Image: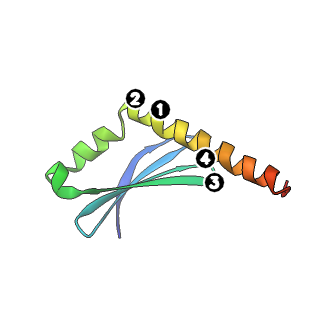
Amino acid sequence: MRYVGDIATTETYKILLYTWNEKYIVKIEAGPYEQLYKVNQLDFLGDETAIREVFADDVFLKSIFARFQQMHADFGEVLHRLDLL
């Protein structure tokens, strides 16, 4: 896997871009959680700018961060249910 560069970095999240096996791999990190998106480079005509635009879209980013909140809630719920907290 080859690191291409950061798409965005803030105090709360980091979006990184990689390539591997003719795919773009976008890794979003927020706290202890991460999400990965693997997309075929040919779907974007090998245009790195286009994939960066996708992960700069406000509506898409809101759904990504809502998913992080749900991941956090799910993890907290299972810890409480198993009495691990």
Viewer-nearest of labels 2 and 4?
Answer: 4
Labels 4, 1: front one: 4
Where disc 3 sits, the SS reads loop
* Position in image of residue 7 (x %, y %): 38, 46
Three-letter code, disc 2: Val
Q: Relative to 79, is 26 on the left or the right?
A: left
Give the CA distance from mark 2 to mark 4. Answer: 19 Å
- Which residue occupies the foreground of this view, 16 or 58? 58
Mark pair 3, 2: CA separation: 23 Å
Q: Type of residue at label 3?
A: Pro
Residue wearing tag 4: 71
Decide: few, some or many residues near mark 4? Use Cα within 10 Å; few <14, some 14-19, many ≥20: some
Q: Residue flagged by tag 4: what amino acid is it?
A: Met
Q: Give the mark, 4 or 3, whose residue is nearer the N terminus.
A: 3
Quote the CA–CA distance across marks 4 and 1: 14 Å
For residue 55, which quarter of the picture? top left
Q: Position of residue 59 (x, y in %)?
A: 40, 29
Please report the residue visible at 86 percent of the width from the left and 55 percent of the height from the top.
Answer: 83
Q: What is the crowding at mark 3: few (fewer than 14 residues within 10 Å), some, or many (at least 20)?
A: few
- The coloring applied to the image is rainbow
Q: Residues within 10 Å of mark 2 (few under 14, many from 20)?
A: few
Residue, disc 2 = 59
Report which quarter residue 66 is drawn in. Answer: top right
Q: Residues within 10 Å of mark 1 (few under 14, many from 20)?
A: few
Q: Eyeballing the image, is 1 above or below 55?
A: below
Label 4: element kind: helix
Do the residues under discs 4 and 1 have CB atoms within 8 angstroms? Answer: no
